[in-house]
Amino acid sequence: QVQLVESGGGLVQAGGSLRLSCAASGSISGIHAMGWSRQAPGKQRELVAVITDSAGTNYADSVKGRFTISRDTAKNTVSLQMNGLESEDTAVYYCYADIGPFYRITRSWGRGTQVTVSS
């Protein structure tokens, strides 16, 4: 059983910054990619950023240049630095991790943390 716990959400004014963090614990045999998705009210969940076990990164077009994902492999943590926040960034942000041997990788999700950007 793997647990992912997010922290760092909150209320911020447009143009401000927040840093989200996520820690993985439990029966971790090996973490591959880690990332963040978000879901705004009435919208589908969308991928925001991902970082591979070799530190390759990818971002949604809407956050490129504003958000930065990073991870600490030794601590099994992933962070998302969000700058230049816009009202459209308001959503519940979910951390995820792809875990397990290559022949049976499973994705685990955190419970989410609310980010609200006021205009």
Image (cartoon, rainbow, N blue to C red):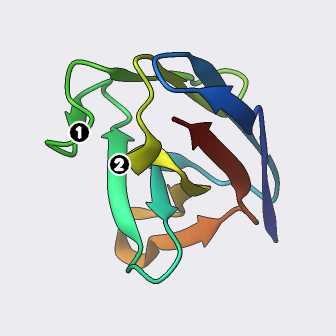
Quote the CA–CA distance across marks 1 and 2: 6 Å
Badge number at residue 59: 1
For the point 33% across and 58% down, which residue is it?
47
* In this picture, residue 68 sits left or right of residue 74: left
Residue 17, placed above or below residue 1: above
Residue pointed to by mark 2: 48
Q: Amino acid at mark 1?
A: Tyr
Q: Is residue 20 above or below residue 84?
A: below
Residue at left offset 44%, top offset 16%:
83
Mark 2, other Cα within 10 Å: few <14 / some 14–19 / many ≥20: many
Residue at figure coordinates x 57%, y 49% from the top left:
30
**Residue 60 vertical placement versus 77 (above, below):** below
Q: As rendered, which of 20 and 42 lies closer to the eye? A: 42
Residue 111's image quarter? Answer: bottom right
Q: Is residue 20 visible?
A: no
Which element type, helix, strand or loop, lies under badge 2?
strand
